[in-house]
Image (tube, rainbow, N blue to C red):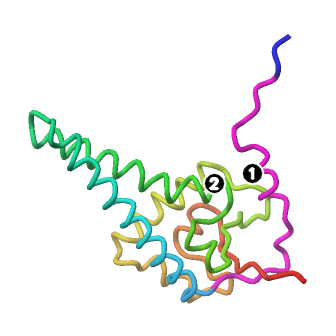
Amino acid sequence: MEPKQKEPFRIVRELAGHADYSHCKPAGIRIRLAALFIDAALVSILDQSIRLVFERGILAQQSSLADGFTVLWGVTLISTCLYWVLPVYLWGHTAGKRLLGLRVIRFDHEPKLTLSQCVLRELVGKFLSGLCLGAGHLMALGNKERRTSYDRLSGTCVIKEEEHD
């Protein structure tokens, strides 16, 4: 009999998902925007690094400049999506949120975020919020849960984790 295949990162996700966050308070808009700016800076550095590698390597070998830019934008889009979705799915935060002690959790307090919730929140919801000039962020000002439009869309909320002694 073959050994049962395990989901990659299963143990990491289980450890991250079993904490009790009932004592934590919703994160305010200012700290969330600060985390967003940190993440945007990190994504920008990642994007510029990828561009540099491709401009020096692949673009120099492309027969068509348009083909090279298509590859460049494709790789940049994939890496950017992975930066926003994968860490939230696995650990509940991006690097910026982690630095500031924030975590994305399910609003219904189930233990783990689903991949569809993360994609809906990080890609679809934030894209739509950006199209409205960030108006989705302003929704957090008008409710006690401090939930933005993309939090509501994906069934999530952001909390400020408190230190335990």
Element type at marker 2? helix
Do the residues under discs 2 and 1 have CB atoms within 8 angstroms? yes
In-front residue for pair 65/114: 65
Which amino acid is tagged 1?
A: Arg
The x, y position of residue 123, in whole percent, is 46, 58
Q: Name the residue nearer the viewer: 32 or 139.
A: 32
* Residue 146 against residue 107 in the figure, above or below: below
Q: Assess whether residue 114 is covered by the magenta stretch.
A: no
Q: Is residue 11 magenta?
A: yes
Q: Is residue 44 left or right of residue 153?
A: left
Residue reaching furthest to the top: 1
Which residue position holds label 2? 89
Closest to the observer: 72 or 129? 72
- Which image quarter: residue 142? bottom right
Query: As displayed, is residue 9 above or below residue 15?
Result: above
Amino acid type, mark 2: Tyr
Q: Give the position of the N terminus as an image quadrant.
A: top right
Give coordinates of residue 56: x percent, y percent. 21, 48
As measured in the structure, the alpha-carbon distance from the residue carrying label 2 to the one carrying label 1 is: 8 Å
Q: Residue at x 79, y 64 (%)?
A: 109
Q: How many marks?
A: 2
Residue at image location 75% in from the left, 55% down from the top: 112
Q: Position of residue 29 (x, y in %)?
A: 56, 86
Q: Position of residue 90 (x, y in %)?
A: 66, 53
Q: Is 74 positioned to the left or the right of 18 in the image?
A: left
Q: Residue at x 60, y 57 (%)?
A: 87
Report the disc number at residue 13: 1
| Residue span colored magenta | 4-27
Labels 2 and 1: the sequence-earlier one: 1
Quick one: label 1, few (<14), some, or many (20+) residues within 10 Å? some
